[in-house]
Image (tube, rainbow, N blue to C red):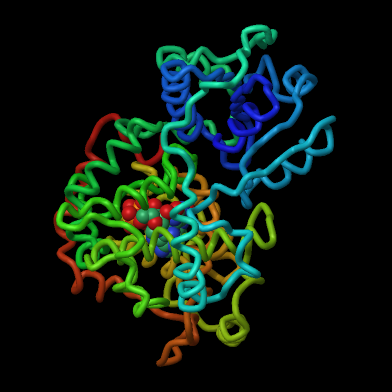
Amino acid sequence: MDYSIHLAKKFKKPLVIFESVLMDFEWSSPRLHQFILEGICDTAEEASRVGFTYWPFIETKEHSLSEILPFILEKASVVVTDDFPCFFLPEHAEKLAGILNCKLLLVDSNSITPLASYEKSFGYARVLRPKLHDRFVESYVHRSNPKPSPKGIPSSDTLKKLKFLFSGKKEDISSYLQKMSSKLPNILPVLGKTGGRKEGLKLLKKFLKEGLPFYSEERSEPRPPERVRSSSLSPYLHFGMISVEEVVTAVLQSDPKIDWSPDILNHSYRGKNEGFFHPNPNINSFLDELLTWRELGYLLFYKDPSFRKDLSILPNWAKLTLEAHKGDKREYTYTKEEFEKAITHDPIWNAAQKELVLTGTIQNYLRMLWGKKIIEWSSSPEEAFRILEDLNHKYAYDGRDPNSYTGILWCFGAFDRPWSPERAVFGNIRYMSSDSTSKKFKLKPYLEYIRSLEGMSELRLFR
Ligand SMILES: Cc1cc2nc3c(=O)[nH]c(=O)nc-3n(C[C@H](O)[C@H](O)[C@H](O)COP(=O)(O)OP(=O)(O)OC[C@H]3O[C@@H](n4cnc5c(N)ncnc54)[C@H](O)[C@@H]3O)c2cc1C
């Protein structure tokens, strides 16, 4: 937005914000479509309040994007879009560049530090961390304008408005959902889960008050959603409904005892996961996830944009140890359908899988256990990877993201080190067990919450 506004003012051209939603992308479903459309309604309201021209287009069975794109682009002097490095977006940017008569500019607004400023991607958080810390001050100072204004941009009133634009009104969402097709029509929206900027900001506010003050100690604790200590922001970050920059700013300025400015950074902690950003350990712990761990995956894609990553990116030690244990006897094996239906012998694993299906999210610690157990109970690492990728992307609101691959591939040893003792199936890959999880945490309230979901008449594991 910032850069488009700059160009519109500089070259005295009207600015049109065009947002399109495709129907049939991989893993598309009414669950995802509704979340995205709710986001569009918030953007439409805000654009009209501030005075920007916003044209949202939703692809339906009647009108495809390719049908209307030429009308949009014929008058464009320049097109500015996001440089998102994963899923179908890199391929779409390539295609768009091929049909435009003007320049296409991709702006990297993926995180706070520009991903292009790193010479390569990194296999370990400890290698990325000092480099990220080095770049932080300059990036922080150059954050985008939090209140973009159309003042000084020529009016777009003379432009011929497209037909078939979405009204941006919440009451029209359901009729649009009916006109859209999707790859997974049975994956329905989760009741009470709302997409959009307003909800993202609401969650951020709640997190600053109720989650952040306990984050470093209690983030991993599986709990019912009203009592979790993590932010629940991942779907909003994924769909760009809230930005990393504004979350970082809000978090750094959240401690009333400290008037934060870059002078507070403690450079003697450069490269460490604590102490660098803030004297408050909860803030450091959260920013290490939001910046270091998130950027690891984003950089992996940014340096080699692609739809997905797979086991080929694992470090050599992980590939060798998985290969050496490929033929090991598995105590249990399940098919994808059995995993999906949450009918394994393990009640904790089943609860995490049910949380994913019924609510579109899994608590972070259980997500790691969930992934590790699919490796342990699948016939091969390749099969486990396929199941993990599919279940994660199919049900999770935050799926189809570079973080999805960081998380899934971490379960196979990526970004991690070899662990002893060497075990069946896993070899030297870090092992996790449901037994130790139940000793580490008080799981009763979480398990009761999952049972209560199953009991709700409007929620079913499969419809
Ligand atoms: C098997 C597996 C699959 C995963 N799939 C996804 C996915 O599809 N999409 C996704 O966003 N995350 C994924 N993760 C990472 C992590 O589980 C989620 O980012 C986190 O639980 C989101 O909850 P939150 O927003 O409350 O996180 P918070 O703890 O509040 O953290 C704030 C933000 O920091 C980032 N973050 C936090 N933890 C991690 C992490 N370990 N790695 C990378 N970034 C992180 C996320 O953007 C998150 O929203 C996966 C992890 C595993 C083990």
Q: Is residue 404 shown above or below 314? A: above
Q: Measuring 38% from the left and 63% from the top, which residue is drawn there?
A: 289
State the quadrant of the N terminus: top right
Q: Is residue 251 shown above or below 74? A: below
Q: Measuring 59% from the left and 59% from the top, which residue is drawn there?
A: 115
Query: Residue 383 at what x, y percent from top left?
Result: 58, 65
Taking 295 as reference, is 196 left or right? left
Query: Residue 177 at what x, y percent from top left?
Result: 51, 21
Q: Nearer the viewer, residue 153 or 302?
A: 153
Q: Nearer the viewer, residue 197 or 1?
A: 1
Taking 36 as reference, is 358 left or right? left
Residue 92 lies in quadrant:
top right
Q: Measuring 49% from the left and 35% from the top, which residue is drawn there?
A: 32
Q: Nearer the viewer, residue 57 or 30?
A: 57
Q: Is residue 167 shown above or below 233? A: above
Q: Is residue 179 visible?
A: yes
Q: Measuring 28% from the left and 54% from the top, which residue is drawn there?
A: 230
State the quadrant of the C terminus: top left
Query: Residue 48 at what x, y percent from top left?
Result: 46, 16
Taking 431 as reference, is 167 left or right? right
Q: Is residue 350 visible?
A: no
Taking 369 as reference, is 449 left or right? left
Where's ligand 1: which quadrant?
A: bottom left
Number of residue marks: 0
Q: Can you name the residue that lies furthest to the bottom here?
A: 421
Q: Is residue 449 shown above or below 32? A: below
Residue 366 lies in quadrant:
bottom left
Query: Residue 133 at what x, y percent from top left?
Result: 44, 69
